[in-house]
Image (tube, grey):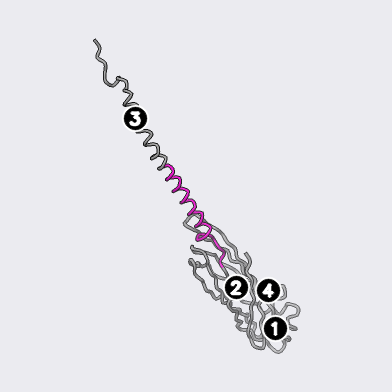
Amino acid sequence: MAVRSDSTRPLSPGQVRSDKKQEEMGRPQRNLRLYGCVFLLLTITAVIITLIFTVFQIKDPDIKVNSVTVKQLVFANNGGVPGGRNITLVADVSLKNRNVASFKFGNTTSTISYGGVVVGEGWIPAAVSKSKRTLRMNVSMDVIPEKLMAVPGFTADVISGALNMTTYTRVQGKVKLLKIIEATMVMKLNCTVVYNISSQTAESHCKQHH
């Protein structure tokens, strides 16, 4: 005679009700854990988005020319520059990095124009402006006297006592946040420099463009 195994014995009605009751009691806990995970994920996403648009928002650095001085600018009686020496303009420049990461930029060239003609240039070496810091630099720009004196109206400006020159500087660099977000920024700085011959002083007015 075959012996029936207990494993094949059907569950009693009491056991079925007990298992169903345990399943119903465990369901709210699973739902609670699921809702908790979803809420945590939404919270983290909201925090990340908030940081990206506030603390980690990438901003263009500010470039400011504090002062401009002119060296070796001596005129002869005939309105020329004696000795054939280059004229040197020295600009005190500040670059304020408003980002929470460093701003790195490469070698930069500045040009000087007089009467619509480029008469000289200078350069800014590659550098790094640290987070929330201001980098201060002295930028020297050399003007070639022969080009300056060849511009029509030069002698008349010397007699009037003032020379009006313009400078153009283009700075290109990168900001990288958390080794993930990287942005390339280009700043353009246009300046008008008025040199007073009698007082040998220079005034500058600059405007930054992005």
Q: Is residue 24 magenta?
A: no
Specify which label sits upstream in the sequence, 3 or 2. 3
The disc labelled 1 sits on which kind of residue? Ala
Specify which label sits upstream in the sequence, 4 or 2. 4
Q: Are marks 4 and 3 in contact (CB under 8 Å)?
A: no
x and y percentages locating residue 179 in the rendered image: 47, 56
Q: Main secondary structure of the magenta part?
A: helix
Q: Is residue 138 left or right of residue 117?
A: left
Quickly name the residue at label 2: 122
Could you tell me which secondary element the residue under label 4 belongs to? Answer: strand
Question: Which circle, 3 or 1, is nearer the viewer?
Answer: 3
Q: Is residue 34 magenta?
A: yes
The disc labelled 2 sits on which kind of residue? Gly
43 or 124: nearer the eye?
A: 43
53 or 171: nearer the eye?
A: 53
Q: Residues within 10 Å of mark 3 (few under 14, many from 20)?
A: few
Question: Which circle, 3 or 2, is nearer the viewer?
Answer: 3
Quickly name the residue at label 3: 19
Quickly name the residue at label 4: 113
Quickly name the residue at label 1: 162
Q: Are marks 2 and 1 in contact (CB under 8 Å)?
A: no
